[in-house]
Image (cartoon, grey):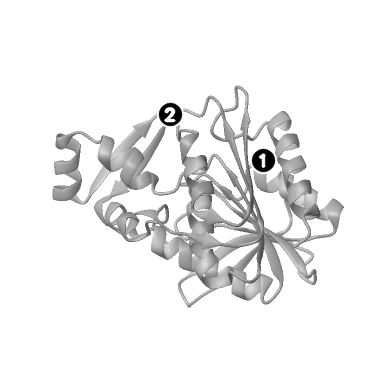
Amino acid sequence: MSNFKYLKISKTKKLRYLSINQNSNLFIVFLHGFMSDIEGDKPKNFLKYCKKKKLGFLAIEYSGHGKSSGKFTKCNISRWTEDVRLMIQKIVKKNNFILIGSSMGSWLSINQFKYFKNQIKGFLGIGSGPEFLEHLMWKKFSKKIKREIVKKGIYNLKHGEYQYPITYQLIKDGKKNKVLHKKYKLKIPITMVHGSKDEVVPVNYSRKILKIFKNTKKKILVIKNGDHSLSNKSALKKINKELDKILSYKL
């Protein structure tokens, strides 16, 4: 994709992003998952979708991810939340937008409501994993692993063919960013899409997100036999249809 750009934050920090139609008055903002990037099938899909619909599009690559600057082990939810806030301010500006969060991206999406409550006109979550650091990692770690993280400050978690460097500061920061206890009263459409065979984040996390939003048009779509990424053509087609419905909602 030739639409990759960099936003220079400081002399040593830059964030990579993907954007088109920056003069639009309505954007789709895509937030990727933990240790992911903006080169996958989902950002490609939403870029194509926005080209067809003539909507603004922004996909953000957080610090320590992909080709953005920063060391992953020095980053956390607070920093990534700030990356997103800054990028929306710089690119989307005062225009309205719909958030699409994939996995951890949904957690970062919820954190944006405190900054852009009046600009957010919809929220679509994909395999959403809010507070996963505590509930799906820390609480499931053995006492031995917990001791190692506290002592060494880091533990390399193996999951399939991947290895995730989980730092103690990341875990502690995650506890400072709890969102599932919050309550938002917003008249916007919110849809959660989750795979029935998601082995990373249970479906009930999408249901937990819906509970924090009041007075909204809420929906959950569980895709039969769907995995965590939901990046295949069939799943993306269904997600695009849900995005169509969000766009058609009269605010």
Asked if 229 appears above or below 179 in the picture, the reply is: above
Q: Is residue 14 visible?
A: no
Residue, far top: 225
Q: Tell me where residue 192 sits by quadrant.
A: top right
Q: Residue at x 83, y 54 (%)?
A: 51
Question: Tag 2's secondary structure?
Answer: loop
Q: Tell me where residue 116 sits by quadrant.
A: bottom right
Residue, far front: 215
Q: Tell me where residue 12 sits by quadrant.
A: bottom left
Q: Residues within 10 Å of mark 2 (few under 14, many from 20)?
A: few
Which label sits on residue 147? none
Tell me the quarter of the image containing the C terminus: bottom right
Tag 1: amino acid: Asp
Q: Where is residue 100 drawn, in percent x and y?
A: 63, 52
Question: Tag 1's secondary structure?
Answer: helix
Disc 2 designates what residue? 161
Is 176 or 90 nearer to us in this picture?
Answer: 176
Disc 1 designates what residue? 41
Number of marks present in the image shown: 2
- 22 lies left or right of 38: right
Tag 2: amino acid: Glu
- 157 lies left or right of 144: right
